[in-house]
Image (cartoon, coloured by chain):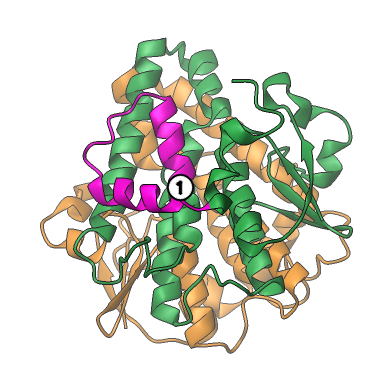
Chain colours: A green, B orange
């Protein structure tokens, strides 16, 4: 198995955690988004969208971090990263999509680059854009967790799921962008629980061999 | 089962198609996004993100269109909207996420409203933004379909899957926004096949009771 990632990518951070939680060994290849290596010749064959992460499982290529997690769940069921019941699975998937659809895409380096090139957005306006979407998305995420009996030590029950795998990188990213996270006590409490696990800790951007600070 | 939607929402268009393909009857409730009805008092209890669609299955609420489709797949397996094999399921899910993460979120009315309020984006600049993301996303989607033997009459094989359910509304949305779609012949060919099915046709925005043109 080959994992294509980049230390700073939140989406690759997700799949690093998932591989670790599943105990799946993968050879890591690093695509430096800062040097636009994703746009170099042959990476398009791995990922036509020229994004990371990608997973190459013996020639079968899977793109998109959430699809990679579902694929790992189906091919390496233990330990499960989704609950067993359909309503619980729907809750976890909706939490993942809250981050993956409503927060992350609007805040990527490529989106912010477009804000600058099309609208001439100043650094201050870009920060306002970033803070707005983080606050909107994380407020809703916190509302789903707080006072819901399905929330446990982790986002869903007392074992990590895909929801935690999506939440932790988004918090890291928000912190890098100096967002105030004090309004999300349940998320912060769960993040601390996650970070006590090797699977999460070893996947952190600062612990990657390609990390350049 | 209660489906909360809005005729113009691409995400609700997806879940309308999925319900139709599954043959699941749902009572429809309409949340007029044009009148900000999603921000009115009690809808927050249904959907803390105040988005459509939402599904209420006898009191159990599912948010996020892709999570709703996965929930329907698990609770109403026939006809399947995912293939049986893990690599095929991963391919279909990645196609869905190409639309749901990389194209749709950046183009919503709420994102474009922010472009105007934060950056003072002109209508022309907003069109440039829209066209850029559509072209980027759909070019990659077309590349995944074209010349891949897994592509059949539909995006994956010869029966509709979640990938078609995500693709058709995005094409409709792009056409409404006057994007040139001539570069996506495989998608257009599959769209025509989909639109011959009642499940797709009856879910079209113009066929909804709350449609206001």
In reply to whether residue A192 is colored magenta, the answer given is yes
Name the spot of residue A174 as percent of width and height, x first: 40, 32
Q: Chain of mark 1?
A: A
Q: Residue furthest left?
A: B41
Give, as a single range, the part of the protein colored magenta.
Answer: A168-197
Q: Is residue A153 left or right of residue B46?
A: right
Name the spot of residue B68 as percent of width and height, x first: 44, 71
Name the spot of residue A50 as percent of width and height, x first: 73, 37
Q: Nearer the viewer, residue B147 or A186?
A: A186
Q: Is residue B160 left or right of residue A47?
A: left
* Residue at 40% across, 75% down: A88
In reply to whether residue A115 is colored magenta, the answer given is no
Q: Callout 1: helix, strand or loop?
A: helix
State the image quarter where residue B189 is shown: bottom right
State the image quarter where residue A68 is shown: bottom right
* Residue at 45% across, 58% down: A163
Disc 1 marks which residue? Answer: A195
Q: Nearer the viewer, residue B173 or A144?
A: A144
State which quarter of the image contains the N terminus of chain B: bottom left
* Residue at 78% across, 71% down: B153
Q: Nearer the viewer, residue B163 or B182?
A: B163
Q: Is residue B21 left or right of residue B121?
A: right
Above or below, B45 relative to A194? below
The secondary structure that most of the magenta stretch takes on is: helix
* Residue at 43% across, 13% down: A121
Q: Is residue A125 left or right of residue B14?
A: left
């Amino acid at each position: 198995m080959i994992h294509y990632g980049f230390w700073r990518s939140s989406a690759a951070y997700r799949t690093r955690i998932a591989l670790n939680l599943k105990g799946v060994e993968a050879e890591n290849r690093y695509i430096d988004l800062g040097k636009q290596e994703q746009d170099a010749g042959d990476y398009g064959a791995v990922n036509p969208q020229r994004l990371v992460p990608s997973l190459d499982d013996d020639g079968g290529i899977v793109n998109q971090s959430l699809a990679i997690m579902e694929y790992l769940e189906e091919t390496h069921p233990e330990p499960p990263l989704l609950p067993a019941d359909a309503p619980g699975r729907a809750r976890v998937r909706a939490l993942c999509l809250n981050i993956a659809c409503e927060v992350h895409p609007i805040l990527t380096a490529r989106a912010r680059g477009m804000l600058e090139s099309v609208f001439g957005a100043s650094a201050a306006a870009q920060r306002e854009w970033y803070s707005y979407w983080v606050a909107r998305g994380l407020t809703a995420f916190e509302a789903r967790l707080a006072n819901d009996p399905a929330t446990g030590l982790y986002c869903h029950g007392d074992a990590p799921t895909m929801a935690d795998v999506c939440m932790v990188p988004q918090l890291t990213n928000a912190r890098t962008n100096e967002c105030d996270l004090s309004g999300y006590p349940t998320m912060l409490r769960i993040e601390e629980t996650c970070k006590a696990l090797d699977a999460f800790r070893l996947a952190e951007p600062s612990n990657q061999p390609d990390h350049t600070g």
